[in-house]
Amino acid sequence: MTPADLTRTVLHTVRCAVEADELRAAVPTRVTVRVPPRPGCGDYATNVALRLAKDTGRPAREIAEVLRRRLAREPGIARVEIAEPGFLNITLQGSSYVRLVRGILDGEGAPGESLPLHPDPGLVRRLGPDAARWAQVSPPGLDHDLLLVQRESNPLFRVRYAHARTRALLRNARDLGFEPLPGELDDSAAAPLLAALGDHPRITATRAPDRLARHLERAADAFLRWQADSPTLPRGDEKPSAVHRARLALAEATGKVLADGLTQLGITAPAHL
């Protein structure tokens, strides 16, 4: 079950509960399913019960219990738990991490369409086209001159550096004779990165350039932190293992997400930086 499949399943569950008169609420047109930011909270989480509680005045936990019973019977779902104040934490049968990474690498879902950004011509002359576009979607108060320097304080540099780093890892792995292969990772440090990757389709669907830029920062920062704790390449005389291949697959998936987001913003995603 992919995140898109699970979204449809949650929406179908709400509709069935309303039709059975277990819930008296308007069926939403869409629901949100996200990868939790912390391990141990299931594979995915949804706030649909909280949304329905606002519309009905009924306690969110009661609504969550109605949906939990129905969701737990759906094929592909191993268990559903309720977290305060009414989130539904969903654990799928099998490995959701592997499915998420494999889906990204297989090109699941079409790349996001370019967003209409038209930076001021004077800003383009001063900063260049890439930095000018990033400046257009930056929070108020950002010193635009910061976008011209290659340092950690420059958010555009961090995003592009993270993408270039994923490409370098793939090149170095090929030199060592191994390829990426999605697999299991006993690596809690990867949870924030997986959450960011799982969020990409939802953020893309908003068609909001500023939200996409902040999302790319979040993904890049999570990737760089994860890389510091979880080496992708073997060290010294160490031979490539299944863990190295799985980490390389996660790095490649991150690179694809970052490249897609930068392309939507009209910004180049260099393989070398």
Image (cartoon, grey):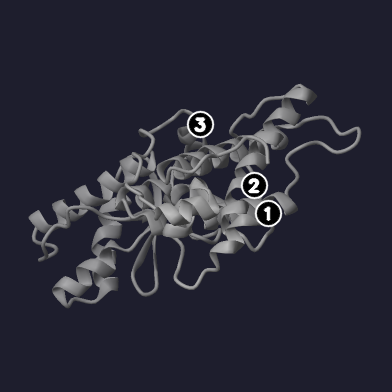
Q: Tell me where residue 95 appears, x and y as whole percent.
A: 51, 41
The foreground one among 263 and 230 is 263
Under mark 2, the amino acid is Tyr
**Residue under circle 1?**
150
The residue sitting at 27% across, 62% down in the picture is 48
Q: In the shown orientation, is residue 108 left or right of residue 250?
A: left
Q: Secondary structure at mark 2?
A: helix
2 or 1: mark nearer the eye: 1
Q: Secondary structure at mark 3?
A: helix
Cα distance in 3D space between marks 2 and 3: 20 Å
Q: In the shown orientation, is residue 170 left or right of residue 254?
A: right
The residue sitting at 27% across, 51% down in the picture is 10
The label shown at residue 105 is 3
Cα distance in 3D space between marks 2 and 1: 9 Å
Q: In the shown orientation, is residue 40 left or right of residue 246?
A: left
The residue sitting at 11% across, 58% down in the picture is 18
The foreground one among 85 and 236 is 236
The residue sitting at 69% across, 58% down in the picture is 151
Q: Secondary structure at mark 1?
A: loop
Disc 1 packing (10 Å; few <14; some 14–19; many ≥20): some
Asked if the residue under mark 1 is in contact with the one under mark 2, i.e. CB atoms within 8 Å, the reply is yes
Q: Tell me where residue 253 appears, x and y as whole percent.
A: 55, 38
The foreground one among 122 and 47 is 122
Instruction: Count up the numbered dots.
Output: 3
Q: Tell me where residue 266 appears, x and y as whole percent.
A: 43, 42
**Residue under circle 2?**
161
